[in-house]
Image: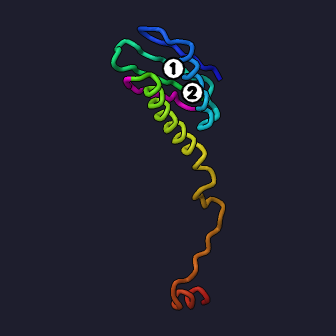
């Protein structure tokens, strides 16, 4: 899994990059086929930091989450929460349909509801 952290209109310190990397590297817990994570931190507005997270996974569309907050870590946490929800929903969608609620190949025999239906079936 490749992780790329970049910034626009400013510079991120090594400690902030390490904190962001630690947070985003937890994403494979929610969906294990992640191949790349791109994080872009936009520092143009001093009052509101914008964080964009883009995740590329095998056999899945690209996932994108954005959040804006006054503090960098709060914006990262908000975007991470949105990304976790997307990945969790996609995993449930992919894995949830297999074997649940499917009656293919199963023979279902209905019980007669009344004595009249039972008598008709015996004739």
From this viewpoint, which residue is outermost toward the front?
A: 15
From the viewer's side, name the closer residue of 30 and 46.
46
Q: Are marks 2 and 1 in contact (CB under 8 Å)?
A: yes
Residue 101, how many percent across, how many down? 57, 58
Dot 1 surroundings within 10 Å: few (below 14), some, or many (20 or more)? many
x 49%, y 39%: residue: 85
Labels in figure, total? 2
From the viewer's side, name the closer residue of 110 and 80.
80
Judging from the image, what secondary structure is the residue with disc 2 in?
helix
x 44%, y 10%: residue: 8
Q: What stretch of residues is rendered in magenta?
A: 59-70
x 58%, y 49%: residue: 96
Q: Separation of disc 2 and disc 1 at Cα?
A: 9 Å
x 62%, y 33%: residue: 28
Residue 68 in magenta stretch: yes
From the viewer's side, name the closer residue of 90 and 121.
90
Residue 64 in magenta stretch: yes
- In the rendered image of this protein, does residue 95 appear above or below residue 5? below
The residue singled out by tag 1 in the image is 39
The residue singled out by tag 2 in the image is 24
Residue 99, how many percent across, how many down? 63, 54
Query: Mark number for residue 104?
Result: none
From the viewer's side, name the closer residue of 77 and 94.
77
Q: Quadrant of residue 70?
A: top left
Residue 89, how many percent across, how many down? 51, 42
Q: Quadrant of the N terminus?
A: top right
- In the rendered image of this protein, does residue 23 appear above or below residue 17? below
Q: In the image, is 14 to the left or to the right of 8?
A: right
* Sequence-first disc among 2 and 1: 2
Q: Quadrant of the C terminus?
A: bottom right
């Amino acid at each position: 899994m490749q992780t790329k952290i970049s910034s626009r209109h400013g510079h991120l310190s090594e400690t902030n990059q390490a904190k962001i990397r630690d947070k985003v590297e937890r994403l494979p817990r929610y969906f294990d086929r992640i191949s790349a994570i791109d994080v872009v931190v936009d520092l143009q507005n001093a009052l509101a930091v914008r964080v964009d997270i883009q995740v590329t996974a095998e056999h899945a569309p690209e996932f994108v989450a954005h959040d804006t907050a006054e503090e960098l870590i709060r914006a990262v946490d908000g975007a991470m929460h949105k990304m976790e929800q997307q990945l969790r929903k996609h995993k449930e969608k992919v894995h949830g349909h297999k074997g649940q609620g499917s009656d293919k190949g199963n023979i279902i025999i209905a019980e007669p509801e009344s004595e009249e239906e039972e008598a008709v079936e015996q004739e």
